[in-house]
């Protein structure tokens, strides 16, 4: 589950996914482009999470399995954004894998994920707001 | 919304309108009228506990605690589905046929007295509601917490052997055995429907537009608005109906008037001919006037041919001949006198009369000449003009005068007879009138046989006037009278018949005219009220639309929010939802855009999208603040949804579950899987049905377990830096314990009848895990200092674990993390098992 960690701007896979969605270079890929697109989008999510660890000076966390990383994420960024990143990653993983009885994601579906990530991923880089009422909803916060 | 508040709101709007007082009064009066045909709040539901039972307040918030079922549909022996009262998501998963829908329907039937799935099915379907594997008894028990009532409220419905589905006996009771009536919930159940099933969601969007309108309209609390519109529409209907009937009747009435030969009809037609200038008074006068008396004169200046004709007929009908007796008496008198005269003429009386005539002539001759010629000599010498020899002198005159007197005396009887004859002839001339003018004119202008016959008979009759011979006159009277009488009577009868005919046609026509004129006068009087009602309706419809738009906005926004979560890959956007139209035209306008292009047609959407849209529209209804039901039971919402939408649905349900108790029955693992993957707080129960309809429930995942599972996953991650684990695992454990405490506090306080908002406020106010534990242990957050001692009293490990997860969050936990998780699970169980 752990991935090699060359530094990659999340913008790069997002832009490549966008190209695929616009039909550029799709010819060679035949019918597999939707899954490839889903993988690209998932890669963008993972890169954005890596950026969080770098920003907090904890690059060793990049090597953790994604489930653990997503569990740690609410301790570092806005809880709602962390939740959304989690569901996006799981949904994209599911779409990227071949599941029995499930069809590949549609172009509209992928485009929407693409749009969502465009607004969601930058939120990971923002300094987290002070949660109201002391504790964030998940209570997962290494507080001082 | 209460009627008075609505009235105030509308009254305030009326003040700012430019409507005349008359019109605004109409609206306010309609608002004050009680709605007809609506059920009063006091109507008891059959099968309820009946008299002496306390009614449940319609606004007290309700959560479900448990649903127990025996012998109903797929469920055989008694089984209980326990739920955590208070907000939260519970998924009950089970394969098709495991009995999950039976639970959902049982809860609905027990609480509402009917199941939607069943009430609309044919008898052959309804027959299968009893479980085949159980004995005769069917029993459903729903336990709930009700705000303001201490201890759980149990609503039961049971059926004896042989009862129909609708014949179940319902009862509700408090924990201490007090009887309750659930009739206060009836309106809320139909308005908010906390039970949603797949079939119902599909029906609502696929059904008649008005049904969806009604369903949404009910939640807006604007029934009074609909009532007012109905009242005003009915008033307008009454007024326009009268006017419509009036003008529907107008053309046929005019046609009938014009077709009639009657002169009055023509006049009325003239008066009413121009709808813009009705002369109602003239028409009324003509219609109300009695039929003309026979023989009445033709009105002066009468120019209408038919009128002349009518007058002529009237004159002819009035023609009369002398009475036959009178004619006979006169004729007899003439004959008698004539006979008497001729008899006297042969006697001395006759001679005397003749002589007297002669002498009188001679005397007259003498006087004429003596008077005229003063010459006495000449006169004295004048000879007698009869004999020529005698002299007519003074002496002769004296003798002759004396003789004449004597003769006249002797001839007196004859003179009397002659006088009688003269009188009789005068009478004849009075009796026998010339041809009447009416007959003469008719004769001139007509060739009809009766007219000609009567004319000829009358001419012969009138000729009698010229005769002087009494016998000839008497003969003439006898001969001319019978044909005259016959001919004239025939003519008069014919004329009268023609007149009657005209009146027979006129009288009903006159009645119609009179009725129409009355109606027209009423319509004239109603014109103002009608205009007022129209104006009131027009204004009110606009005001009602504004009210509706305003009221539905929060719901529509919620719907749009839900849809945006549900739609996932869908290219369909949901804009504002509006309730438009009225009466039979009422419908729900969904502002649906497909790829940014307007499309009101729901036909562009897939079944799964329609279903999701239905949820988006009806979740806000079921979760409306006004609903007492803080729970929501959804049966199989994921059918025909694609995987991406299931993720969206899971998030929507989790969102709703933040403030509501959401119980979802689902036939596959997709929703549970989504909940697990997205780490949404939820309880997952698996339902397994064994042979003999024995149904078992097994808790698969609950919110506490979710946090512990996360913690275990972290611990199992070998490469996780120790410092992270040391901080995060206690944090997750702490959240697990807090969740357990919250659950206990909610269960206890809600069961005691506390207000739900107060419970949530108390939980929010308890910031730290110690305060939450104090709430769970002592029901008092201020006794936080006593928590550790209390736990220590329970077991030393409990206090140690509590301390570890409380402090580990801040300083990290140095001990065995796996052991901490195990102990946390035990500690959470301890908290959850507190009474």
Image: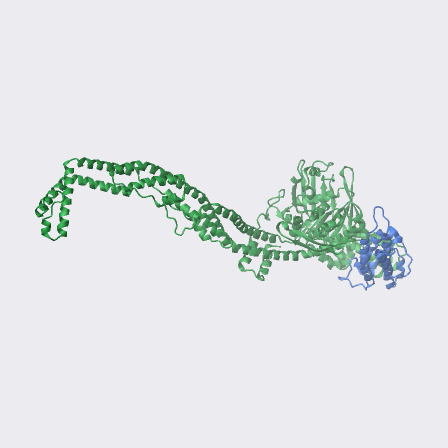
Chain colours: A blue, B green
**Residue B796 against residue B165 in the figure, above or below:** below
Question: Percent from the top left, x then y, of residue B82?
Answer: 74, 46
Asked whether residue B568 appears in the rendered view, the answer is yes
Q: How many marks?
A: 0
In front: B601, or B577? B601
Q: Quadrant of the N terminus of chain B?
A: bottom right
The quadrant in which residue B31 appears is bottom right
Query: Farthest residue toward the left?
Result: B395
Given residues B121 and B707, the one toward you in this image is B121
- State the image quarter where residue B489 is shown: top left
Q: Position of residue B3 (x, y in %)?
A: 59, 54
- Spot occupied by residue B120 in the image (x, y as percentages of width and height): 68, 42
Relative to B626, A38 lies left or right: right
In this picture, residue A41 sits left or right of residue B553: right
Q: Position of residue B663 (x, y in %)?
A: 74, 48
Q: Residue, x 25% and y 43% (percent of image)?
A: B426
Instruction: State the residue in front, B756 or A74.
Output: A74
Query: Can the viewer see residue B705 in this picture?
Result: no
């Amino acid at each position: 589950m752990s991935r090699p960690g060359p530094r990659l701007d999340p913008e790069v896979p997002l832009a490549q996914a966008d190209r695929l969605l616009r039909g550029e270079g799709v010819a060679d890929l035949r019918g597999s482009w939707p899954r490839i697109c889903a993988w690209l989008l998932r890669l963008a999510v993972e890169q954005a999470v890596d950026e969080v660890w770098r920003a907090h000076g904890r690059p060793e966390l990049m090597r953790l399995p994604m489930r653990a990383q997503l569990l740690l994420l609410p301790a570092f960024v806005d809880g709602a954004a962390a939740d959304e990143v989690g569901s996006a990653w799981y949904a994209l993983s599911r779409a990227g894998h071949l599941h029995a009885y499930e069809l590949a994601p549609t172009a509209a579906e992928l485009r929407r994920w693409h749009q969502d990530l465009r607004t969601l991923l930058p939120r990971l880089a923002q300094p987290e707001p002070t949660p109201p009422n002391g504790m964030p909803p998940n209570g997962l916060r290494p507080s001082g | 919304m209460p009627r008075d508040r609505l009235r105030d709101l509308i009254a305030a709007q009326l003040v700012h309108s430019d409507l005349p007082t008359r019109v605004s009064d109409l609206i306010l009066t309609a608002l004050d009228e009680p709605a007809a045909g609506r059920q009063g709040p006091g109507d008891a539901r059959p099968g309820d506990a009946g008299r002496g039972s306390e009614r449940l307040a319609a606004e007290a918030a309700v959560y479900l605690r448990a649903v127990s079922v025996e012998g109903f549909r797929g469920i055989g022996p008694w089984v209980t589905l326990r739920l955590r009262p208070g907000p939260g998501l519970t998924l009950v998963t089970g394969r098709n046929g495991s009995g999950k829908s039976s639970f959902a329907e049982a809860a609905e039937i027990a609480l509402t007295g009917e199941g939607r799935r069943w009430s609309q099915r044919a008898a052959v379907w309804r027959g299968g509601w009893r479980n085949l594997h159980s004995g005769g008894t069917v029993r459903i028990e729903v336990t709930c917490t009700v705000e303001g009532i201490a201890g759980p409220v149990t609503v039961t419905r049971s059926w004896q052997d042989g009862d129909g589905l609708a014949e179940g006996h319902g009862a509700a009771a408090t924990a201490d055995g007090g009887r309750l009536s659930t009739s206060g919930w009836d309106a809320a159940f139909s308005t908010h429907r906390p039970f949603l099933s797949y079939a119902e969601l599909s029906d609502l969007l696929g059904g008649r537009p008005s049904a969806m309108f009604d369903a949404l309209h009910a939640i807006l609390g604007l029934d009074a608005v609909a009532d007012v519109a109905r009242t005003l529409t009915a008033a307008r209907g009454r007024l326009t109906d009268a006017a419509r009937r009036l003008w529907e009747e107008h053309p046929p009435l005019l046609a009938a008037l014009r077709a009639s030969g009657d002169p009055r009809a023509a006049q009325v037609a003239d008066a009413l001919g121009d709808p813009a200038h009705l002369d109602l008074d003239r028409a009324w006068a003509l219609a109300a006037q009695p039929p003309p008396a026979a023989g009445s004169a033709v009105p002066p200046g009468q120019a209408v041919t038919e009128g002349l004709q009518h007058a002529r007929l009237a004159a002819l009908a009035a023609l009369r001949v002398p009475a036959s007796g009178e004619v006979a008496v006169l004729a007899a008198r003439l004959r008698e006198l004539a006979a008497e005269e001729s008899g006297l003429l042969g006697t001395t009386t006759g001679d005397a009369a003749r002589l007297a005539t002669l002498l009188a002539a001679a005397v007259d001759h003498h006087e004429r000449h003596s008077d005229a010629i003063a010459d006495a000599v000449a006169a004295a010498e004048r000879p007698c003009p009869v004999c020529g020899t005698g002299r007519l002198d003074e002496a002769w005159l004296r003798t002759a005068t004396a003789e004449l007197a004597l003769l006249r005396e002797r001839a007196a009887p004859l003179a009397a007879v002659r006088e009688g004859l003269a009188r009789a002839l005068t009478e004849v001339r009075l009796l026998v009138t010339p041809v009447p003018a009416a007959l003469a004119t008719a004769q001139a202008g007509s060739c009809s046989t009766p007219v000609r016959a009567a004319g000829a008979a009358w001419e012969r009759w009138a000729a009698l006037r010229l005769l002087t011979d009494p016998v000839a006159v008497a003969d003439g009277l006898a001969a001319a009278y019978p044909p005259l009488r016959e001919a004239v009577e025939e003519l008069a009868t014919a004329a009268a018949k023609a007149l009657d005919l005209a009146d027979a046609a006129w009288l009903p026509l006159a009645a119609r005219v009179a009725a129409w004129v009355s109606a027209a006068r009423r319509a004239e009087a109603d014109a103002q009220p009608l205009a007022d009602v129209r104006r009131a309706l027009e204004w009110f419809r606009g005001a009602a639309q504004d009210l509706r738009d305003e009221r539905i906005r929060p719901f529509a926004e919620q719907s749009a929010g839900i849809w945006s979560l549900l739609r996932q890959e869908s290219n369909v956007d949901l804009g504002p939802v509006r309730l438009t139209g009225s009466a039979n035209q009422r419908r729900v306008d969904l502002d649906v855009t497909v790829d940014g292009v307007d499309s009101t047609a729901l036909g562009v959407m897939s079944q799964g999208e329609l279903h999701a849209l239905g949820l988006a529209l009806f979740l806000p209804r079921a979760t409306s603040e006004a609903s007492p039901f803080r729970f929501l039971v959804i049966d199989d919402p994921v059918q025909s949804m694609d995987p991406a939408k299931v993720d969206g649905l899971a998030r929507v349900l989790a969102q709703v579950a933040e403030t509501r108790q959401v119980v979802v029955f689902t036939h596959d693992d997709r929703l549970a899987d989504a909940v697990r993957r997205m780490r949404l707080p939820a309880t997952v129960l698996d339902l397994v049905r064994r042979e003999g309809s024995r149904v078992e429930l097994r808790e698969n995942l609950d919110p506490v377990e979710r946090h512990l599972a996360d913690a275990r996953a972290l611990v199992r991650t070998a490469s996780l830096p120790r410092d992270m684990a040391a901080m995060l695992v206690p944090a997750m454990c702490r959240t697990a314990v807090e969740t357990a405490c919250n659950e206990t506090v909610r269960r206890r306080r809600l069961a005691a009848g506390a207000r739900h908002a107060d419970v949530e406020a108390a939980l929010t106010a308890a910031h730290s895990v110690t305060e939450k534990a104090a709430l769970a242990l002592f029901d008092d957050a201020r006794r936080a200092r006593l928590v550790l001692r209390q736990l220590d009293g329970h077991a030393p490990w409990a206090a140690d674990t509590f301390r570890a997860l409380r402090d580990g969050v801040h300083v990290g936990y140095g001990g065995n993390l796996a052991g901490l998780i195990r102990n946390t699970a035990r500690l959470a169980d301890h908290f959850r098992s507190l009474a």
